[in-house]
Amino acid sequence: MSVKNAQAKASLATLIEEKLGFTMVKSRDFGTRSGSDNSYSAKGTMPINYSVRSDESVLKRALKRQQLNKIQRQQNIEQITAMALSVCPDVTSQGRPDPDWLEHFIVLAEDIANQNMQKLWAKILVGETVSPGTFSIKSLQTLKQMTQREATALQKCAALCGYLEKEDSYLILLGYYKKPSFFDLLRKGNKESINLGSAGLSFPNILTLMDINIVYRKEIESANLKQGQSIQFSFHSKKLTLTPKSNELVLSYYKLTQTGDELKKLVSSPINKKYKQQLEQAFIDEFDCQWS
């Protein structure tokens, strides 16, 4: 057995012992067995040559595992609440969280052992305490089921999201096009698109966010913008004001769902620099672009 395999097996044995509360050892019946650990029987089944080292009954072992699970869950929720108290601002609360919401939060959060994810759950508890109704139970369930890959996609998405106060929602600007005039119907009109992939948000990332109901599946278009009709987007600490230089301009964007809007509040990140450059390059011809 190679050193790497031995290290992996030792690591696996440690994980099993932590979760079961008992050590797994090689059964004596297989002590003199020849061949590799990956050998199969004539029926194609792999022999199980390990068992629990314990004189206790299966029932007692099961009860011990349940106790270990309860201890881990208690430690998780204590860690999350401690983090929440540490980051809670000294502001006036707008009320108490709904009791049913709080019960759902405890049940869902107690299984969160990853420290980075615990920080997000702590922020949720703080946000709901300061302003009840900020986070829905549906958003909690989405976050609970979120994989590390999905969480990474959300972080990348957050760096491109602009907040549109008029719609009270976050969106990702994709570009714009200009509708052709009545006398030039055969021309498709000017169109500018932004490559999100070069800004770190790949198309597979976008599909992932759509699958978990963070981003709406269809690209959305704005109403026709009129010359001089300014529209403002907030990107973390910066604001972008776009003012059309002519009529018949239409913005295209991805819009975050209600769940996406709520979870975006947990990820505070400055605007992606490459995306900011692309915005300026794409809109400069047809819009006055002002950052503040």
Image: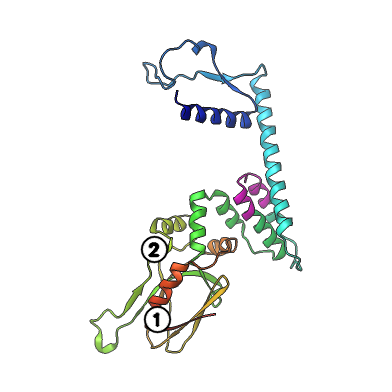
Write the start and end of the magenta stretch as one range. 104-120
Q: Classify 286 as above or below 271.
A: below
Amino acid at dot 2: Ser
**Circle 1 residue:** 284
Q: Nearer the viewer, residue 14 or 70?
A: 14
Q: Classify 278 as above or below 5.
A: below
- In the displayed structure image, the side of residue 225 where residue 50 appears, left or right: right
Q: Quadrant of the C terminus?
A: bottom right
Whether 274 is among the magenta residues is no
Disc 2 secondary structure class: helix
Q: Can residue 194 be seen here?
A: yes
Q: Residue at x 68, y 28 (%)?
A: 63
- In the displayed structure image, the side of residue 188 where residue 194 appears, left or right: right
Q: Which mark is residue 74?
A: none
Amino acid at dot 1: Ile
Q: Can residue 221 be seen here?
A: no
- Mark 2 residue crowding within 10 angstroms, few (<14) / some (14–19) / many (20+): few
Q: Furthest-front residue in view?
A: 3
Q: Main secondary structure of the magenta part?
A: helix
In primary-sequence order, the first of circles 1 and 2 is 2
Q: Residue at x 25, y 86 (%)?
A: 184
**Circle 2 residue:** 198
Q: Nearer the viewer, residue 234 or 169?
A: 234
Q: Nearer the viewer, residue 276 or 265?
A: 276
Give how far across and how far down residue 262 sits, in percent: 58, 63
Q: Residue at x 48, y 56 (%)?
A: 153
- In the displayed structure image, the side of residue 170 where residue 121 appears, left or right: right
